[in-house]
Amino acid sequence: MRDVELFRQAATVKLSKNKTFYEQQLEAILKENNIEFETQKLIKRYIVDFYFPKNKVVIELDGIQHK
């Protein structure tokens, strides 16, 4: 089970470093508007693109990597 957890953490780091164009654009807009968020957040067995802890909202931007 520990190996799976380590794999997910490594995947999260890799995804954080390789953001899509649309993820970069949304992140810039959120930062400009001082909105609190986390990117590539590990939630249970999922890695979500954007997580807003104040409202417990997730945004997932699907791109070519999902095809």
Image: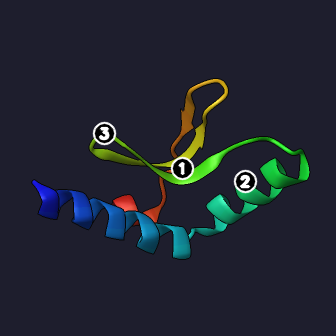
1 or 3: mark nearer the eye: 3
Q: Residue at x 64, y 24 (%)?
A: 55
Q: CA distance from mark 1 to mark 3?
A: 18 Å
Q: Earlier in the sequence, mark 2 or mark 1?
A: 2
Query: Circle 2 — which element?
Result: helix
Whether label 2 touches label 1, CB < 8 Å: yes
Which residue is label 2 attached to? 26
**Rendered view: 62 above or below 36:** below
Residue type pointed to by label 1: Leu
In which quadrant is the C terminus drawn? bottom left
Position in image of residue 60 (x %, y %)? 51, 44
User: Seen in the image, is 42 located left or right of residue 39?
Assistant: left
Residue 18 visible within the image: no
The foreground one among 33 and 44 is: 44
Graded by Cα atoms within 10 Å as few (under 14), some (14 to 19) or many (20 or more), the crowding at tag 2 reads few
Q: CA distance from mark 2 to mark 1?
A: 10 Å
Residue type pointed to by label 2: Leu
Which residue is label 3 attached to? 44
3 or 2: mark nearer the eye: 3
Which residue is label 1 attached to? 61
